[in-house]
Image: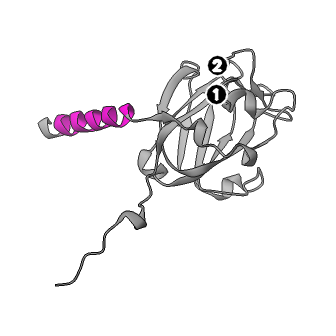
Amino acid sequence: MAAASAASATSATSATAINRNQVDLSDFINWSGVECLNQNFSHTFTNALNQTCRDNDSLLLESDADEQLLIYIPFNQVVKLHSLVIKGPEEEGPRTVKLFSNKENMGFGNVNDYPPSDTIVLSPENLTGKSEVVKYVKFQNVRSLTIFIEDNQSGTDTTKIQKIALYGTTVETTDMKGLKKIEDH
């Protein structure tokens, strides 16, 4: 029992250490490549994802034909995703959120063909802006993130999202020019 408590304390400490270095990844999104399937064109992904819009609760992303949304977010450099915040109305906010790392060209027809990197089931309390930590080990070298909103809280016809914020770090690449050759002796 003591070993389990020590392991738990260690993981809590490392999770806290990880949190301190996290940044908002919106600056690293390749905005021209973002796609959102089944969005209402009066209420697009920009309202929920863009830093200047997402804190205005009157602006939101809304689904169109049914409750599902499929959002593809490419990054302009490799990132490590640590957590995300999804904010939405209690009744129409998303419930089941599936995250896919580095899966391109996904559509509603093939989204179930791939196992998600992580699945998050949100409660109405989670939709108030609470940060959700992802399976960090699965999101170490992320070039793109696909977010599949499978359903919403109450089964209504449309899903509404006020905010999607992604937090993590960039992956530092090694500068090969800066390395010095080790001479053989």
Quadrant where the C terminus is found in the figure: bottom left
Residues rendered magenta in the picture: 4-20
Say which residue label 2 marks. 55
Q: Is residue 9 visible?
A: yes
Q: Which residue occupies 71% across, 42% down? A: 31
Residue 175 image offset from top left, x and y in percent: 42, 61
Residue 59 on the magenta segment: no
The three-letter code of the residue at mark 1 reads Gln
Task: Please say if 184 is above or below 96.
Answer: below
Q: Do tag 1 and tag 2 residues touch (Cβ < 8 Å)?
A: yes
Residue 64 image offset from top left, x and y in percent: 85, 33
Quadrant where the N terminus is found in the figure: top left
Q: Is residue 167 left or right of residue 178?
A: right
Residue 16 on the magenta segment: yes
Residue 182 image offset from top left, x and y in percent: 25, 75
Of residues 17 and 170, the one nearer the viewer is 170
Residue 184 image offset from top left, x and y in percent: 21, 84
The three-letter code of the residue at mark 2 reads Asp
Pointer 1 local density, CA inside 10 Å: few below 14, some 14–19, many at least 20: some
Q: Which residue occupies 44% across, 57% down? A: 173
Say which residue label 1 marks. 51
